[in-house]
Image (cartoon, helix red, strand yellow):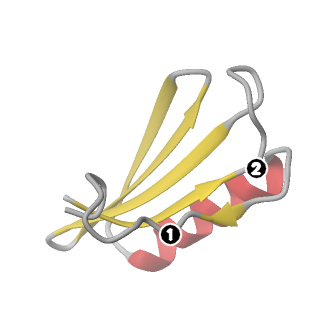
Amino acid sequence: MGTREHWWNGLFGPQAKQDIYVRRQGGRWTVEHRRRDISRLWHCDSEGHARSIVEGLRAAGPGHWREVREEPGSAEAR
């Protein structure tokens, strides 16, 4: 399952840091929201549905969300 996008709210610390991952495998999309070492998953049949979940999470979450670009050769990029 390849990660297509990774968003971070720009905050540090276990109580504040949040991440959102968008992944695709075959025709299915998965959105993962990580907060305080707890993950919540949404399984979507379309990219549009996945993106609407991401936008809702970013709008509701604290901080200044930014997309994280993985370096080539990193574990996430493989």
Query: Disc 2 on helix, strand or loop?
Result: loop
Residue positioned most to the bottom: 48
Asked if 73 appears above or below 46 in the picture, the reply is: above
Image quarter of residue 11: top right
Residue 39 at x, y = what percent? Answer: 47, 31
Reading the chain from its start, which is encountered first: label 1 or label 2?
2
Is the C terminus in the top left, top right, bottom left or bottom right quadrant? bottom left
Asked if 9 appears above or below 68 in the picture, the reply is: above
In whole angstroms, how far apart are the C-alphas of marks 1 and 2? 13 Å
**Tag 2 residue:** 10
- Amino acid on which the number 2 mark rests in the picture: Gly
Point 60% across, 69% down: residue: 52
Which of 59 and 1 lies nearest the eye of the viewer? Answer: 1
Is the N terminus in the top left, top right, bottom left or bottom right quadrant? bottom left
- Amino acid on which the number 1 mark rests in the picture: Arg
Point 85% across, 49% down: residue: 63
Residue 68 at x, y = what percent? Answer: 56, 63
**Dot label at residue 69:** 1
Residue 10 at x, y = what percent? Answer: 76, 49
Contact flag, marks 1 and 2 (Cβ < 8 Å): no
Residue positioned most to the left: 26
Point 77% across, 30% down: residue: 16
Point 81% across, 49% down: residue: 60
**Dot label at residue 8:** none
Which of 12 and 64 lies nearest the eye of the viewer? Answer: 12
Query: Disc 1 on helix, strand or loop?
Result: loop
Residue 44 at x, y = what percent? Answer: 37, 61
